[in-house]
Image (tube, grey):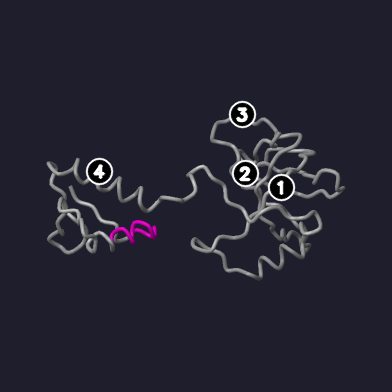
Amino acid sequence: MRGSAAQSRDPHSRRARLDRDASPRSHRALRRSRHGRGTDLERAKLDRFARAFDEEVARWTAGAPAADTIETDGELAPAEIALDTAQALRAGGPWGQAFPEPCFDGLFSIRSARLIGERHVKMWVEVPRSGRAFDAIAFNHLEEGAQFVPPSGLAQLVYRLEVNEYQGERRLQLLVDHVLPAAT
């Protein structure tokens, strides 16, 4: 068997690849490939390698958030959910893989929701008891072939602030990444 993480952009696999050779209990089941890239693994040593690999992954992921954890930058005050804030965040970029765009979470009342195309949901949401309402969209919200059931009532939204430029007008729009049930 052969494999390589040489082209991986994942920092954990790159770091593990670098540390493997420096490890005092180096994985003797592996040997360098003839071409200097990747490694060869004898089938008879696969179980030993799999155990060592699982131990190394567990060591690297200790203390890391669970896969189903959603990380946000917290909740914004209703007055902070504004076009000025979205413009400041846009100017604060660039955002990327190792430097994600800020996202926020909060409790909203979904006043209306409709399907756009086959998978996107356009919503009008309001911060409860504030009188502040916003245009929001959740791209690729529906799984392919799923029936649309419009979200309604209170929901916990995970969103990013976006400047929506349309016909020369700039307006605030919430780009919704997750629509979750409101905590009770």
Whether tag 3 and tag 4 are in contact, CB under 8 A, the answer is no
Residue at the spot 45% in from the left edge and 51% down from the top edge: 63
Q: How many marks?
A: 4
Tell me the distance, in whole angstroms, between the alpha carbons under discs 1 and 4.
42 Å
Between circles 1 and 3, the one closer to the viewer is: 1
Disc 2 target residue: 178
Under circle 2, the secondary element is strand
Secondary structure, mark 3, is loop
Distance of label 2 from label 3 (alpha carbons) = 18 Å
Please, is residue 69 above or below residue 89 in the view? above
| Residue position for label 1 | 106
Taking the spot 78% from the left edge, 38% from the top edge, the residue there is 112
Kindly identify which residue carries mark 4: 51
Please tell me how crowded label 4 is: few (under 14), some (14-19), or many (20+) other residues with Cα within 10 Å.
few
Amino acid beneath label 1:
Gly
Between disc 3 and disc 4, the foreground one is 4
Of the two numbered discs 2 and 3 in the rendering, the one whose residue sits closer to the viewer: 2
> Badge 2 local density, few (<14 within 10 Å), some, or many (20+)?
some
- Image quadrant of residue 89? bottom right
Which callout, 4 or 2, points to the residue nearer the camera? 4
Q: What residue type is labelled 3?
A: Gln
Question: How many neighbours does mark 1 have within 10 angstroms: few (below 14), some (14-19), or many (20 or more)?
Answer: some
Determine the CA span between mark 4 and mark 2. Answer: 36 Å
Kind of residue at badge 4? Arg
16 falls in the magenta region? yes
The residue beneath circle 3 is 147
Q: Is residue 29 above or below residue 150?
A: below
Q: Are dots 4 and 2 in contact, CB under 8 Å?
A: no
